[in-house]
Image (spheres, grey):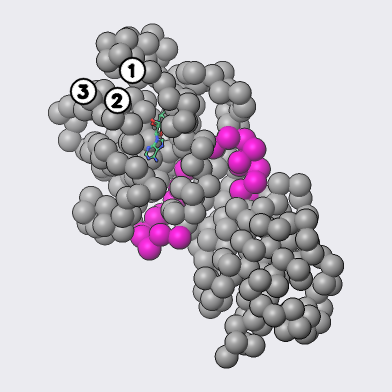
Amino acid sequence: MKLYSQKTIKQIIDAFGFQFSKSLGQNFLTDYNIVRKIVEVADIENKYVLEIGPGIGTLTDEIRKSAKKVVSVEIDNDLIPILFSNFSGIENVKIIHKDFLKINLEKLCNDEFSGEKFSVVSNLPYNITSPVIEKLLKSNTKIEKMTLMVQKEMAMRMLAKVNEKNYSSLSLLVCFYSKAEMKFKVPNTVFIPKPKVDSAVVTMIPELYDETVNRNLLNDLIRAAFNKRRKTILNSLSDIEEKENLKEIFKSLNLNENLRSENLNIDDYINLANEIEKKRQ
Ligand code: SAM
């Protein structure tokens, strides 16, 4: 079945009385070239694959042709009978009816992939992109590569560099936990229903930027800095550490107290975390 064809999607929707949910970020792919390109970029020949949000299974169907096994996690009750019907009898596809954000990822990987390495491929629901990326990057699993379609603006935030307009806590998270790359842009015309904005496909290969820093402290610093991004970094971090200590640390690191969150790169945040840790010992 051509699950990417508008005609097939409409037939399935009618047959099951399915209605698109905006709050679940449901925009289904309708272009085979894009589906093919995502799977090509993902490079999943004979690999284990985790898919988040299969919809009616358009991407799933292309993934299962080359993957060893694909496990697709879908939250929507109404899509489950459609997915079971589309993949009945196909042995290397497993549908799991759950909220990906609530799933125990470590357990899932042990149960479904025997704890071995796997890749993630997803056309992500736009409303939960950040928490999904955070969950994947911070997970204690053997992710080999992530190939994710996200809104174009989100891709820009993920890949932004220090002092750029889109630089955010997400940029730092992505940079700390992975090597990320923009692969290609996707116009909004290839989805049903058509979203307002274009999308982009980004890959991330997990790789820790620094193994020794206290990651919880680094995380707290970045969060605090970007929560109050209009304030100077010294003021935003004063909830985490005493101002006098911070002043000394800034001086020792040769950092200007009047800088703001967007002016500090990952090394600056790591140095701050290390110095604060030292003061606390
Ligand atoms: N993969 C399909 C495609 O490309 O045509 C659908 C992608 S659509 C952008 C996002 C999918 O994620 C929808 O099927 C939606 O129901 C599902 N979804 C939304 N929130 C979810 C969650 N928390 N856990 C699992 N799936 C979710």
What amino acid is at disc 3?
Ser
* Helix, strand or loop under label 2: helix
What amino acid is at disc 2?
Asp
Classify residue 70 by image quadrant.
top left
On residue 18, the disc is: 1
**Do the numbered discs 1 and 2 sit on residues whose CB atoms are within 8 Å?**
yes
Q: How crowded is mark 1: few (under 14 residues within 10 Å), some or many (20 or more)?
A: few
Q: Earlier in the sequence, mark 2 or mark 3?
A: 2
Above/below status of 227 relative to 18: below
Range shown magenta: 138-159
What amino acid is at disc 1?
Phe
Q: Where is residue 278 in the image (x, y as percent from the top left)?
A: 62, 87
- Please name the residue shown 15% across and 28% down the image: 89
Q: Can residue 59 be found in the magenta stretch?
A: no
Could you say which is closer to the camera, residue 92 or residue 216?
Answer: 216
- Please name the residue shown 70% across and 51% down the image: 167
* Helix, strand or loop under label 3: helix
